[in-house]
Image: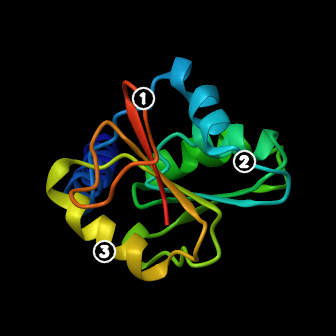
Amino acid sequence: MVFILLFLFLVSGFALAGLVGAPWVPTYRRDVEKIIADCQLKHSQLFIELGCGDGRLVAAAAKRGAKAIGYEINPVMWLVANLRNFKNPTAKIKLANFWQAPVGKADVVFVFLIPKYMARMETKLQTELKPGAKAVSYVYKLPKKEPALKRQKWILYKF
């Protein structure tokens, strides 16, 4: 019985994440440092990852001296991200729906969503980001915003 309850808990976390924004698919390890470099993230800037999964981008941003916050709705991935980042005082992982996450103070926001949510994300970023902030989308583009930089797997936007 305990095994069944644990299994249902695990499955429901992954299902919820897929329904809200995207199922967990990790950003390629080989891309993480390149993405952070393209953001030109400076010491003490605020990096926010919406749907942080295992927290690897949060960790990379924090290692560069940024204040890094990840939002994750899946409790299993939230735990994994916290374990990855527990030694870094400038990294924080929040168990929350990223659609409600405040991004107005962010210098850089990173997202990896499925195409059907990209228009909604574009509206959120347009509405909330401060002038000069950057957003990076992994794999899928924002439908109307012109990119400032395009790489093979990610697109950087300036707001």
The answer to whether residue 132 shows anywhere in this view is: yes
Q: Earlier in the sequence, mark 1 or mark 2?
A: 2
- Where residue 14 sits in the image (x, y, percent)? 29, 48
The answer to whether residue 97 shows anywhere in this view is: no
What residue do we see at 54% from left, 73% from top? 103
Mark 3 and mark 2 residues within 8 Å of each other at the beta carbon: no
What residue do we see at 82% from left, 46% from top? 88
- Where residue 135 sits in the image (x, y, percent)? 49, 56
**Helix, strand, or loop for circle 1?**
loop
Number of the label disc, if any, that sits on residue 93: none
Number of the label disc, if any, that sits on residue 123: 3
Query: What residue is shown with label 2?
Result: 41
Amino acid under disc 3: Thr
93 with respect to 138 (left or right): right
**Helix, strand, or loop for circle 2?**
loop
Mark 1 and mark 2 residues within 8 Å of each other at the beta carbon: no
Cα gap from disc 3 to disc 1, whole angstroms: 23 Å
**Helix, strand, or loop for circle 3?**
helix
Q: Earlier in the sequence, mark 3 or mark 2?
A: 2
138 with respect to 156 (left or right): left
Q: Earlier in the sequence, mark 3 or mark 1?
A: 3
Query: What residue is shown with label 1?
Result: 151
Quadrant of the image occupied by residue 153: top left
Report how many numbered discs are placed on residues in the image.
Answer: 3
- Where residue 44 sits in the image (x, y, percent)? 84, 59
What residue do we see at 24% from left, 69% from top? 120
Amino acid under disc 1: Arg
